[in-house]
Structures are given as C-alpha cells and as structure tokens.
Amino acid sequence: MLLADESPSFSMTHYKIFVFLQKIPTSLQSEPKNTMAALGITIALLVWVVTLLVISIWKQIYSSWNLPPGPFPFPILGNVFQLDLKDIPKSFTKLAKRFGPVFTLHLGSRRIVVLHGYKAVKEVLLNHKNEFSGRGDIPVFQEYKNKGQPFDPTFLIGCAPCNVIADILFHKRFDYNDKKGRRLMSLFNENFYLLSTPWIQLYNNFADYLRYLPGSHRKIMKNASEIKQYALENAKEHLQSLDSNCPRDVTDCLLIEMEKEKHSKEPMYTMENISVTLADLFFAGTETTSTTLRYGLLILMKYPEIEEKLHEEIDRVIGPSRVPAVKDRLEMPYMDAVVHEIQRFINLVPSNLPHEATQDTMFRGYVIPKGTIVIPTLDSLLYDSQEFPDPEKFKPEHFLNENGKFKYSDYFKAFSAGKRVCVGEGLARMELFLLLSAILQHFNLKSLVDPKEIDLKPVTVGFGSIPPEYKLCVIPRS
C-alpha cells in the first residue's frame, strides 16, 4: 500500500480517502444491513475524488496559458512519464525538438521551464542575469543537510575531498550516495582509526612476533587490500584506453612511465607498484583532509565567537552567493589563520611518517647507521611554547600579527618538510580553505550540547589524532 509520505503531492486528505475506500468492501460483507448506506458514502467519496482531480487538471491548464509550450501534464504526477529517469538530459533533447528551445514541464507540484541550446541558455544567464539570479530549490540537498536535524558529518564531509582526489587519480567522481564511494570512505576512516590504536603501535614495532596473532592488524590489511584492488582495477581499465600523448590523470601518467620501461630488466613502474601508489594517494588524499575538516567543525562549535568572526569576514569579502576562490585568502587573514590553527591544534599526524637512514650519517656528533628508522616528530614543532604561547589552547592569534594580518611561522610543519614532505600539501591547503569557507558561507553550526561541554581531546592518538564522534546541526543562513 502506498503511504502518504511516499509522494509529496499525495496529500493526507487523499490518503485518508484511499484508506477508507479500502475498508468499505470489508464492512459491506460484515454488515449486510448497512450496504445501501455504505454504498451511498462510497459514491459520494468517489464524486469528491473525481472533483478534486478535475480541479487539479483545470489549475494546471489555466496556470500554463502564459508559459512556454510543453507536453500536457497528468494530474498529480505531471510529466514524469515523458522523462527517462535514467537519462533526463536525453529526454530534454527530445522534448526540445518537439516544443522548441524553451519549454515547460510539470513534475508533481513543481513547474519547470527548460532552456535548451546555446542561444537560450546564454540569453537567460547573461541578458537576464538579475531576473533569474535566485537559488532554485533542490529537495535532495535539503534532505542531505537533514533539515536542521542532527547528523554525523563523517561521510558527508569526506565526499568533497574524496571526489577531488578521485578526479586527480582516476578521472572519476562519486555521487554522494554511491555505494562504492561510501564503501571506500568507510575503509579509509576505519583504517585511519585502527592505525592510531595502541595495538597497532605495538604491532609496528613487534611485527615479526605478532603478525600471526589475531588482531586489528588483520583488519587493516584486509581493508588496504580492498582499496588496492580498486586502484588496480582502475589502472587496468585505463591501460585499455591509454593515449601516451594525452594523459587524463595520475593513473595515465604512471602507466606511461611503465610503458617506457617495458623492456627494462628491473622496472620501477609495475602494475603492482602503481596500484599501491594509487591506493596510498587515494587514502591519504581523502582521509587526512576529511578528518581535519571534521575536527575543525567541532572546534568552531566549541568557540562560537570565532565562528561569528569568520561569518563576518566571509560576508565582507565573498558575500552570500559567490563561490569562494583561492585568491580570497589574501583578503581573509582570519580564515587563513583559523585554518592553520586547526591544523596546528589537532596535530593530525603527531609523530610524522617514519623515515629511514639511507647511509651511515654523522648527526650532532652521533652516528646514525644506515637502515635506522628516524621519526622527526611534528608535534614538537606545532606545540612549541616559545613559538606558540599557550599551545594547548586554540588561538587563531598564533598566526596573526598585531595588525590582524596573517603571520607565517616556520614552525608550522603540519605537512612535514624536505624530500618526504606531503605531496598533497598544496591541494590540502586549498581544499581546507575553500571547503570551510563554503560551509560557513551558507550555514551556521549548532552543537547539541553546551559549547563549554564539548571535549576536543582525541579519542586515541597513534599514527593520527582521531577526533571524537559527534553530531551537529547546520542551519541555513538567511
């Protein structure tokens, strides 16, 4: 049975009528004496329903008199049967051939005018840009922002950086509800957490003894294998259509190098190495930025006065409708400082990635033998009390001078430095600034608890600093 909330145009009144009509045959059988009375009620209700449908049709016809031409709409459903829901643009092309470059559709209670072709689109966007500058309602987006209701931001926040790096690596993007995309993000998120648990810290130092025991290391390996398999499948697909003169993405660039080494006895570029490299980049390019953003939103909820300052700067520099741009950083020192302070404060990868001595090295009077693991800790720089007074406190002023301008610190090494500096540093800096600006441009953040009660301590610290799980509400800004 169709429920009332399954169709926005199926009103509660219609629903009650529908349910009542279903019950009438049963009452006729169980109560023969009331047959005539029930039949009279049934006929009256049917007349009422028919009247409503006639009124609905009349309203659609009347309201369409001054609109562009288009197919005749069915009551309630509109023109849904004229569209191929698997390829709506193709349907628009067919309808444009029949009704011209400007035509009208009715979908449920929504009236839609479609512009098809260069001339029509250019005219409405340029010659009538003020008249058509309002933001169209997109219900599915409203549902995904959850109508102001609490939600866990983990996967929603992760979709943007995931799509950015997926486009760079594979020339591919995921829909926000794509099962494969959400599966991959789930694997990234789980592995980043597990990598930071005490057991893995132990395992990384005693792998020879612990590798055969049960434990979360096996889960990490299983997840990593699935990610690598996805990368390998994409690499194989790319190889089938590879054009060495026109690389589409990072995968193509790596495959081109592999082709150059085709006859080498000890090739560096193999499908195995390429798939591992792509998997590593995919994981790092998604999860680190996603976690930083998620942690950043939690911090801003704890300090609403900082969020308010960011709103003021965004409104002054960007405004309510223009898309944030990288160039805006020059005029938004407070946002730039907040982004840097978030990275400093959360201390995402506190111990850095392990390095290894490639040769016997004399360092400060000591000999570091070849093969020695070296860990240049990042938290020792990010939490230096001389460079960052009160390092345990979140203070954007750590990156602002006395005039309120952005102040760079050479101690800020959130992406490490040297030859093993994070290859995605530039991309991550850009993403964090643009995504945080875009979120705060359109929404106010609302905590489910008193801001003073928000605990910013990570739930675990190992390979990374893992933020606590939380829910928040996002309220559209007027």
Image (cartoon, rainbow, N blue to C red):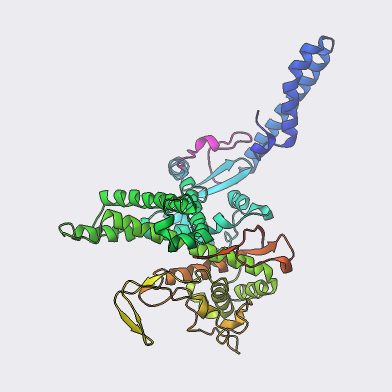
Q: Main secondary structure of the magenta part?
A: loop
Look at the image and tell me in which quarter the C terminus lies.
Answer: bottom right
Asked which quadrant contains residue 42, the reply is top right
Residue at screen point 48% across, 71% down: 351
- Residue closer to the observer: 222 or 409: 222
- Residue closer to the observer: 108 or 474: 474
Up-down relation of residue 450 to residue 306 (above or below): above
191 is within the stretch colored magenta: no
77 is within the stretch colored magenta: yes
Residue 381, percent across and down?
Answer: 51, 80
Classify residue 242 as left or right of residue 53: left
Magenta stretch?
Answer: 67-87
Up-down relation of residue 158 to residue 424 (above or below): above
Residue at screen point 43% across, 72% down: 426
Residue at screen point 42% across, 54% down: 211
Residue 67, percent across and down?
Answer: 58, 46
Asked which quadrant contains residue 294, the reply is bottom right
- Residue closer to the observer: 172 or 408: 408
For residue 114, say whether it is visible.
Answer: yes
For residue 249, say whether it is visible.
Answer: no
Up-down relation of residue 72 to residue 365 (above or below): above
Classify residue 364 as left or right of residue 394: left
* Extreme-top residue of the structure: 32
Residue 436, percent across and down?
Answer: 56, 67
**Total marks drawn?**
0
Residue 316, percent across and down?
Answer: 61, 76
Asked which quadrant contains residue 313, the reply is bottom right
Up-down relation of residue 406 to residue 258 (above or below): below
